[in-house]
Image (cartoon, helix red, strand yellow):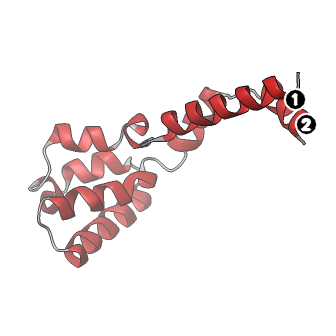
């Protein structure tokens, strides 16, 4: 199993452009949860924030505009979040959390395991 996994990881290719296109496919709606979280942190009641986000998301979808632009143009949301705060929500790299450290940890473990079998 270790040999099979090593082969898979050696031949693994991450197509960053394809990942970006997949993220853009939703026209920013994939970030709705993060807008909700930001509004709640600003003291907006969850139900109110959810209702506003849902309203804006449906309108953006119907109008075929990016969700970020719709959020910025909506008075109910933009009265709580600055333009910079909204822009930061829509940066995918800001939502990776501990992913980088997890990958580094797994890499170290796999490397140590491979030495045992060499």
Crowding at mark 1 (Cα within 10 Å: few <14, some 14-19, many 20+): few
Residue, disc 2: 4
Question: Residue 114: x percent and y percent?
Answer: 80, 27
Q: Are marks 2 and 1 in contact (CB under 8 Å)?
A: yes
16 in relation to 29, above or below: above
Q: Tell me: 32 left or right of 45.
A: right
98 in relation to 62, above or below: above
* Residue found 59% across the figure and 42% down from its top: 22
Q: Tell me: 44 left or right of 3.
A: left
Residue 64 in sight here: no
Q: Residue furthest bottom?
A: 47
102 in relation to 34, above or below: above
* Residue found 90% across the figure and 42% down from its top: 1
Q: Quadrant of residue 36?
A: bottom left
Residue, disc 1: 7
Crowding at mark 2 (Cα within 10 Å: few <14, some 14-19, many 20+): few
Question: Residue 85: x percent and y percent?
Answer: 20, 42
């Amino acid at each position: 199993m270790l040999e099979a996994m090593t082969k898979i990881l050696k031949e693994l290719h991450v197509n960053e452009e394809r990942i970006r296109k997949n993220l853009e496919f939703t026209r920013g709606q994939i970030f709705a949860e993060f807008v909700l979280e930001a509004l709640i942190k600003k003291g907006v009641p969850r139900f109110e924030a959810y209702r506003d986000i849902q309203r804006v998301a449906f309108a953006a979808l119907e109008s075929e505009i990016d969700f970020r632009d719709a959020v910025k143009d909506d008075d109910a949301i933009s009265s709580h979040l600055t333009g910079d705060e909204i822009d930061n929500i829509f940066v995918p790299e800001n939502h990776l959390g501990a992913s980088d450290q997890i990958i580094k940890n797994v890499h170290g473990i796999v490397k140590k395991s491979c030495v045992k079998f060499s």
